[in-house]
Amino acid sequence: MRGAMRPIEEKADVTTMQALRCVEFRVPAPLCLERSGHMLALSLRYGLVGVAAFHHLLIHSFDDEEELEAMTAMEAWGDVVEDHVRWEVRPRLAIHVSDDLPEMVGRFAQESLGALVPLYRRLYPLERSLELLAAKFITDHRPSIERSWNPLVRRRRAAAFRHLAADSVYFACGFFDRRQDDLQEVPEIALIGE
């Protein structure tokens, strides 16, 4: 039988659950995006809020063992996101989605976390890291984001996706600030604005 949780394990669990709630209350609207674009916008939001969550854990790790525990929790983020999308978010999505959507969202959300560690080690500020990660995500997934776009609306839809990405950066920064103050994620914050 496992003993009591260590403080960093408990902090990782709480932070992970709060990050999931943050995204759950701020699921991006489909706007004019195709299904693949909406799925990628949702993935990016989970990824960037995850980055903020684990940045919080890393800066509050007091020794190498706690940092390792935070990194271990970070490696599980994609699986945690997959379960959250499958059971909490998918039934409420405004678009028809396939059965493999939760797995894809989890996989893409994990990508941003993999790119966090080098930026964290170079002491990049969180907001700048989030902006760089969002830009990299858009560049890496441009063909999927733009799939089936008519050339006449491409510019407008690209702007819509960039707007969703900027919102995700903003929400992730707000989430980080609330974690710093140990505030819980509640739907009212999303309703009245950050």
Image (spheres, rainbow, N blue to C red):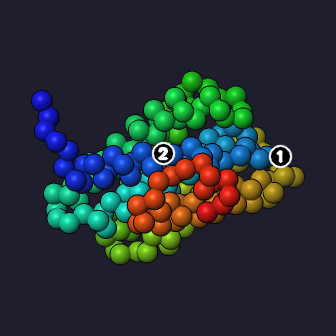
* Mark 2 crowd level (few <14, some 14–19, many ≥20, 10 Å Cα): many
The vertical placement of 77 against 118, above or below, is: above
**Residue 92, can we see it?**
yes
**SS for dot 1:** loop
Residues at circles 2 and 1 in contact by the CB criterion of under 8 Å? no
Dot 2 amino acid type: Leu
Q: Position of residue 63 (x, y in %)?
A: 17, 65
Choose between 163 and 84: the one closer to the eye.
84
Considering every residue shown, the one lying at the far top of the view is: 99
**SS for dot 2:** helix
The vertical placement of 57 against 97, above or below, is: below
Residue visible at 47% across and 54% down in the picture: 184
Q: Position of residue 14 (x, y in %)?
A: 36, 49
Q: Position of residue 154 (x, y in %)?
A: 79, 53
Q: Quadrant of residue 97?
A: top right
Describe residue 97's horizontal placement relative to residue 13 as left or right. Answer: right
* Mark 1 crowd level (few <14, some 14–19, many ≥20, 10 Å Cα): few
Q: Quadrant of residue 77?
A: top left
Residue visible at 41% across and 57% down in the picture: 53
The vertical placement of 180 against 100, above or below, is: below
The residue at which mark 2 appears reads as: 20
**Residue 104, can we see it?**
no
Describe residue 138's horizontal placement relative to residue 110 as left or right. Answer: right
Mark 2 or mark 1, earlier in chain: 2
Distance, label 2 to label 1, CA atoms, is 34 Å
Q: Position of residue 134 (x, y in %)?
A: 55, 60
Tell me the mark number nearer the camera, choosing from 2 and 1: 2
The residue at which mark 1 appears reads as: 150
